[in-house]
Amino acid sequence: MAGDREGLVVGVIGGEQADEVHAELAYEVGRELGARGHTLVCGGRGGVMREACRGARETGGLTVGILPGDDARDANEFVDVPVVTGLGFARNTIIARTAEALVAVDGSYGTLSEIAFGLIAGRPIVALGSWELRDGAGREAPVLRVQSAREAVDACERLAARGRGG
C-alpha cells in the first residue's frame, strides 16, 4: 500500500461494548498485530477497539483511532494517533478503506456497516464471532470465519498479500 512499508494496516472492528470473551479475542488480535509489526486502525473508542489497541500497544504496535466526534480526548488511552473526523458512523468508511484487511470481532450494526464498506472496497474480511451474511439469493458473503486471533492475523497477512501483488 504505502511506499516500502512492510507491515500491513489492519482494521479491527467491533462493538464499543464487549463481553469478556470478545474483549479477550480483540486483545489477542491486537497483540498478534503488534508483535508482527502491523499497524492497527480502528474506531478508537471502547470495547473491542480499546482491547485491540491495548494488545497492539503492549507488543510495540502502532494504533490509529478514527474517531466519530470532534475531540481527540474521546480516544481510548491506547490510541497512538487519534484522527478526529466529526463524521459519526460515516467514519466507518474511512476505517474500511484505510485498512488492507479487516478483522471483525463480535459487534453490532456499526460493525456490520464496516464489513459492508470493506466488502465494497474489496478488502479481505476475517470474522471472529461476528456477523454471518447472505445476499438475497442466499449466497454467503466472502467473509472468512476463523476461531483464534492467530488464525485471524495469519489470514489477513495471506489475503492482503494478494492485494499487494504477493
Image (cartoon, rainbow, N blue to C red):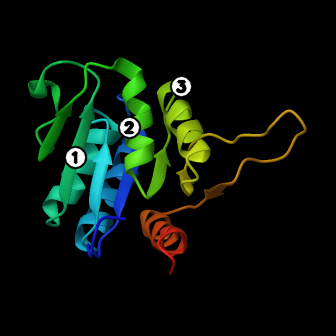
Question: Closer to the N terminus: mark 1 or mark 3?
Answer: 1
Kind of residue sitting beneath label 1:
Val
Residue 124 x %, y % = 56, 58
Disc 2: which residue: 94
Residues at marks 1 and 2, CA–CA distance in whole angstroms: 12 Å
Kind of residue sitting beneath label 2:
Ile
Which image quarter: residue 77?
A: top left
Query: For numbered disc 1, what is the local secondary structure?
Result: strand
Kind of residue sitting beneath label 3:
Tyr
Give the side of residue 54 with respect to residue 129, left or right: left
Image depth: mark 1 or mark 2 in front: 2
**Number of other residues with Cα within 10 Å of mark 1, as a class: few under 14, some 14 to 19, many 20 or more:** many
Disc 3: which residue: 109
**Number of other residues with Cα within 10 Å of mark 2, as a class: few under 14, some 14 to 19, many 20 or more:** some
Question: Closer to the N terminus: mark 1 or mark 2?
Answer: 1
Question: Closer to the N terminus: mark 3 or mark 2?
Answer: 2
- Residue found 28% across the figure and 74% down from its top: 36
- Tell me if I can see residue 119 in this picture: yes
- Residue found 24% across the figure and 72% down from its top: 35
Which image quarter: residue 67?
A: top left
Give the side of residue 65 with respect to residue 155, left or right: left
Residue 159 x %, y % = 54, 69
Quarter in which the N terminus is drawn: bottom left
Q: Of residues 119 and 15, which is closer to you in this image?
A: 119
Residue 49 x %, y % = 31, 40
Disc 1: which residue: 64
